[in-house]
Amino acid sequence: MSERSAAVKAYLLDLQDRICAALETEDGSARFVEDAWERPAGGGGRTRVIENGAVLEKGGVNFSHVFGTGLPPSASAHRPELAGRGFEAMGVSLVMHPENPHIPTSHANVRFFIAEKEGEEAVWWFGGGFDLTPYYGNDEDCQHWHRVAEQACAPFGADVYPRYKAWCDTYFHIKHRNEPRGIGGLFFDDLNEWDFDTCFAFIRAIGDAYIDAYLPIVQRRKGTAFTAQQREFQAFRRGRYVEFNLVYDRGTLFGLQSGGRTESILMSLPPHVQWGYNWKPEAGSEEARLTDYYLQDRDWLGEAAH
């Protein structure tokens, strides 16, 4: 392993530890169970899952470091010039599904990829971001989430947050439903426009910002009472999350096509989901307001200033 890869791996393992510790403390009941695994084709990881907690119904924080020869279709189609190269990919990916429908689902990911071929210069990049998927929207939460995202990006240029916010809105769009998955955040891929040290500093800023973005929202909403009807609506909306992850998500497709560990790859799926034929919320209801107002690729920081 190169010096660069070793430095990134050390950071990612520490990030996984810190996020798990913070979420365990916030939940106050359940603890993460760790499952270390090895990939027959090369590499492995450690999956950590929390279930049936006081706050978190299901959550996973996964570290993986895989390598091999020959990129899977999801990657070679994205970057066809890399076909036939050996690859090394590592990252931390997490999804939190709280029980209370007033607490949004959250997702974050930071990753490093390098592709090598004898006699040619190695190609590397970083990717990642974080996004929020509410069931019952709240302006304060959405504005806070995006404010933390903007602050994490600020040292790297005034244009970074707007570009990666827009990329997030585009990426986490459920095309067959023609609706956003959530209220966005940040998404970036193929990041190598700066030198390695700056790019590495940027993903550290993004990885470190996740807890600052999410925990205050959990703390504000975890005491909010909810009904069985609201839980049912949460289950319907969780179905959208499943649809996106299984149809469009690059990380899911890469993991499955590269022979990754299925249980770890699918840890992001919620435990209870519903689909109803042509189901629609009642017009003018809180449930309808989610899609009518919140899932609209809004400029949350601009609106916060008004």
Image: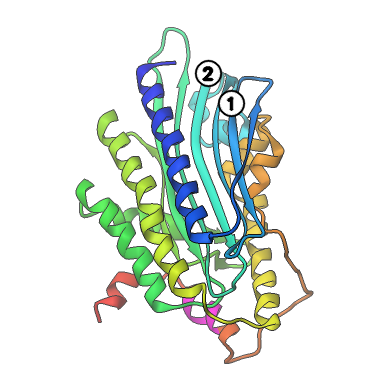
User: Which x, y percent locates residue 100?
Assistant: 59, 72
Q: Which amino acid type corresponds to the residue marked 2 in the rendered image?
A: Arg
User: Which x, y percent locates residue 21?
Assistant: 47, 48
At x 49%, y 40%, the residue is 92
Comes first in the chain, label 1 or label 2:
1
Q: In this view, does 159 lie to the left or right of 65?
A: left
User: Which x, y percent locates residue 162?
Assistant: 30, 58
Label 1: which secondary element: loop
Report if residue 292 lies within the magenta region. Answer: yes
Q: Disc 1 to disc 2, how far (Cα)?
A: 7 Å
Image quadrant assignment for residue 18 = top left
At x 60%, y 21%, the residue is 70
Q: Which amino acid type corresponds to the residue marked 1 in the rendered image?
A: Leu
Q: Name the residue under label 1.
A: 71
At x 58%, y 31%, the residue is 45
Task: Rate crowding at label 2 as few (under 14), some (14 to 19) or many (20 or more) other CA atoms within 10 Å.
Answer: many
Q: Is residue 66 left or right of residue 26?
A: right
Vertical side of 152 occupied by 121: above or below: above
Asked if labels 2 and 1 touch by Cβ distance under 8 angstroms, the answer is: yes
Q: Name the residue under label 2.
A: 85
Image color mode: rainbow
> Which span of residues is magenta-colored?
289-294
Dominant secondary structure of the magenta stretch? helix
Give the residue furthest to the top. 119
Report if residue 52 lies within the magenta region. Answer: no
